[in-house]
Image (tube, rainbow, N blue to C red):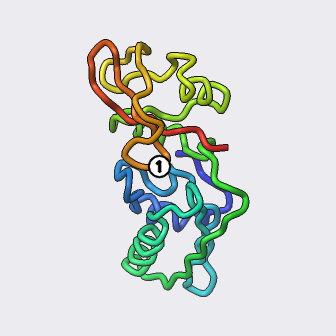
Amino acid sequence: MEQNSSIDTTLYPILEQVSDPEIPVLSILDMGVVRKAIIENNTAFIEITPTYSGCPAMDVIADDITAALKHAGFKSKVKLILAPAWTTDWITARGRKALEDYGIAAPLDAEADKAVLLGNKQLVKCTNCGSNNTHLVSQFGSTACKALFKCNDCQEPFDYFKCLK
């Protein structure tokens, strides 16, 4: 397990149980949205960063964190922080694998991402058959942070999580 050193180890097992509401196979820790989590006087202070400005999932995430901590016997204060801005680099290796297993292609690096979103290269691997013979269908997939791709070999559509830096 990759651990952010700004997160109290007592809170790790609790926060691991809180899923991203848009991608339920990912914990908020694997998404990298939890930036800090400390305990002071039996109150957990949690700082979260949205994956992009205006992300509708952040209110749900804050409510889910509060509920999980309450169930574990903690009071909590959840604070939304905007800087530094979230980046797909913060998705853990476990999170990237979970994305792929769920049927969402994990983000490429910034240069490769630009090339595939402009239709210049076939670098996004199909999450169904593993082929790189894929093409962009739409700049936007099931959410604004994803693009819709289709495999030319197995003909299956799938989401690609766009790189954000």
Q: Is residue 96 above or below residue 62?
A: above
**Residue farthest to the right, as pictured:** 84
> Which of the 4 image quadrants contains residue 18?
bottom left
Near mark 1 (Cα within 10 A), the count class, few <14, some 14-19 or many ≥20, is few
- Residue 113 in sight from this viewpoint: yes
Residue 140 located left or right of residue 121? left
Residue sitting nearer the eye, 116 or 42: 116
Q: Residue at x 67, y 65 (%)?
A: 82
* Residue 87, placed above or below residue 70: above
Question: Quarter of the image holding residue 160?
Answer: top left
Q: Nearer the viewer, residue 76 or 51?
A: 51
Q: Amino acid at mark 1?
A: Ala
- Left or right: 22 in relation to 111: left
Q: Residue 116, image x and y in percent?
A: 54, 24
Q: What residue is pinned by disc 1?
A: 144
Q: Residue 113: percent from the left, percent from the top?
A: 59, 30
Could you say where residue 17 lies in the image, as x and y percent from the top left?
39, 61
Identified at 49% across, 66% down, the residue is 58
What quarter of the picture does the C terminus occupy? Answer: top right
Is residue 10 placed above or below 70 in the rendered structure?
Answer: above
Q: Nearer the viewer, residue 127 or 19?
A: 127
Which residue occupies 48% across, 23% down?
Answer: 124
Tally of numbered tags: 1
Q: Position of residue 140 (x, y in %)?
A: 44, 41
Q: Is residue 72 left or right of residue 51?
A: left
Give the SS element for disc 1.
loop
Give the residue displayed 62% in from the left and 43% down from the top: 164
- Please indicate, yes or no, whether residue 94 appears anywhere in the rendered image: no
